[in-house]
Every structure is written in C-alpha cells, then in structure tokens.
Image: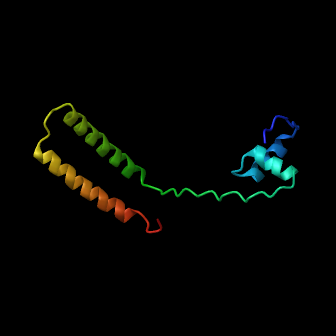
C-alpha cells in the first residue's frame, strides 16, 4: 500500500524525548502508525551492552610504542629492505609474550 499522505503533529521537547525513548530501535513512523491504529507492536530487540575493559594507561602507552616499532619494521620490509633474522625472532618472541599477557589479563566471561 502506497502511503502518500502526511500527518504532522507538534510536540514539546519532553514529548519527543519520551516518544524516542518508547520507540527504542523501532522506526518512529512505523511505531507511531501502529500505535495510533491499534496494531500490535513487537517489543524492540534488546540492546547488547558493550563490555569495556579497563587497562593500565602506562601499559597501553607501552603497547602503542611497540606497535609503532612493528609498523616501522613492516614499512622497511615492504619497501624491499631486508630484515635480519634476529629481528624476526625477536618479533615472534614478542608476539608470544603479548599473546600470553593478553590471555592472562582477559576475564573468562567472554
């Protein structure tokens, strides 16, 4: 069914805030249309909570510096310059150490 007619209403700031809160993840037009026409409205899908893990700022800075060094090595490699075996071995050891540290710092609730 083509909808060609507009229904315009005026609401206050508080009313629009309340409507948006009730609408949740639904499209506002569909929500209001179903509400006015006494049609069933499916409950909105629950919003998934994003888990934010806290981290030591000094640890984050240290990992950032390591990442910068790794990017410089990657850039050198991508330009065709050779990287010594000692650097590659150090990178593998670093990766292993970081993987272990990350695994031990993550909670088991994932």
Q: Quadrant of the N terminus?
A: top right
Describe residue 81's horizontal placement relative to residue 30 as left or right.
left
Describe residue 90's horizontal placement relative to residue 41 as left or right.
left
Task: Please report the residue visible at 11 percent of the width from the left and 42 percent of the height from the top.
Answer: 84
Task: Please report the residue visible at 85 percent of the width from the left and 35 percent of the height from the top.
Answer: 5
Describe residue 30's horizontal placement relative to residue 12 as left or right.
left
Q: Is residue 42 above or below residue 79?
A: below
Q: Position of residue 68 (x, y in %)?
A: 30, 40
The answer to whether one can see residue 18 in this image is no
Q: Going by the picture, which residue comes out furthest to the top?
A: 79
Query: What colour scheme was applied to this rendering of the protein?
Result: rainbow
Comparing 78 with 12, the one in front is 78
Q: Going by the picture, which residue comes out furthest to the bottom?
A: 108
Describe residue 48's horizontal placement relative to residue 104 as left or right.
right
Task: Please report the residue visible at 47 percent of the width from the left and 56 percent of the height from the top.
Answer: 54
The answer to whether one can see residue 13 in this image is yes
Q: Going by the picture, which residue comes out furthest to the front?
A: 1
């Amino acid at each position: 069914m083509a909808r060609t007619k507009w229904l315009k209403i005026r609401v206050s700031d508080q009313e629009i805030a309340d409507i948006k809160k009730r609408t949740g993840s639904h499209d506002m037009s569909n929500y209001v249309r179903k509400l006015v026409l006494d049609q069933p409205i499916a409950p909105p899908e629950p919003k998934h909570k994003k888990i934010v893990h806290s981290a030591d700022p000094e640890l984050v800075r240290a990992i950032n510096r390591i990442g910068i060094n790794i990017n410089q090595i990657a850039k050198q490699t991508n330009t065709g310059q050779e990287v010594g075996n000692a650097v590659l071995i150090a990178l593998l050891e670093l990766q292993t150490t970081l993987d272990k540290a990350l695994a031990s710092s993550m909670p088991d609730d994932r």
